[in-house]
Image (spheres, helix red, strand yellow):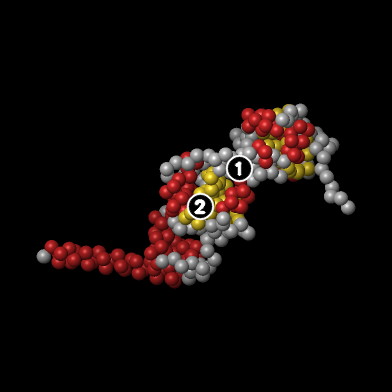
Amino acid sequence: MEPATYHPGATGGVLVLAGTPIGDFGDAPPRLTAELETADVIAAEDTRRLRRLTQALGVQPRGRIVSYFEANESARTPDLVEALAGGARVLLVTDAGMPSVSDPGYRLVAAAVERDIRVTAVPGPSAVLTALALSGLPVDRFCFEGFLPRKAGERLSRLREAAGERRTLVYFEAPHRLDDSLAAMAEVFGADRRAAVCRELTKTYEEIRRGGLGELAAWAAEGVRGEITVVVEGAPAPGATDLAPEELVRRVLVREEAGERRKEAIAAVATEAGLPKREVFDAVVAAKNAAKNAAKDGPTNAARDGA
């Protein structure tokens, strides 16, 4: 039996989520061209970007084009659902990649599903999967974290939530915030945690920069341009870490400075490192005692040196 094929222009209301090229227009699949030509309505995150795409593909859309972006997504969704309910074929495209993945689309899909309207997709390029494949990091298990919060405190909180995550992590980031985000990752995950910064994927100046988070943060401080995807190695498996006591203490202090109680900070660091809480506790106590002894001995040594 031959597999069923799906023909653009078929009757009945259908919502089509179309993946668009993340850089090179040559990556557009043939089905995208067919959908752009036959859709009754094209909802586009940026109509100017859509115009550039259709010109590059040599497509002349026949349908009505409407803007559909974050600021008007809630207001415009009901109208699009009504068009779908009336039998229209609605094509949703975002600036690059797949709608709904850190882009508009979720609300419309949820509303269409609620009305029992068919939803399908034109698979296309994905910055998430492309970055994962190029990163050189494990890809058998991963989780997509989207954009980090802009505020420093919220960003640190979000990263701490993921500190013990063993799957490879994928983030999107704006170029002007990349250095701050990488520095925060180095602080929470450790400067040596492996990562890859994937810049301008599939474009002329594509660049994959690999290294430890501390090293990458120093590089990014000089300024980076373009579309950015960051891939970060997951936390080591329990019992697989070999962190020095000083590093364990540093991680506890970072959490305490952020407002966590010492007991909670020790428990969290123990989970991250895959160690018994007692081992982290002992490292903190030893560091505290060493600091006390150093403070006690300091004046005596100074007096002796001056004698």
Q: Amino acid at mark 2?
A: Arg
At a point 67% along the width and 41% down the height, the residue shown is 27
The image quadrant that residue 104 belongs to is top right
Task: Give me the residue at 59% from left, 49% from top.
Answer: 131
Q: Find residue 189 and report its horizontal and vertical position in percent.
A: 47, 57
Distance in Å between CA atoms under marks 2 and 1: 17 Å
Q: Residue furthest right?
A: 1
Relative depth, front residue between 133 and 269: 133
Horizontal side of 213 relative to 126 (left or right) equals left
Marked residue nearer the N-terminal end (2 or 1): 1
Dot 1 corresponds to which residue?
A: 202
What label does residue 12 carry, if any?
A: none
- Residue to which mark 2 is pinned: 210
Nearer the observer, 120 or 158 = 120
- Label 2–label 1 contact, CB within 8 A: no
The foreground one among 217 and 23 is 23
Q: Report x, y in % for residue 110.
A: 70, 44
In the image, what residue occupies the spot 67% across and 38% down?
26
Q: Amino acid at mark 1?
A: Thr
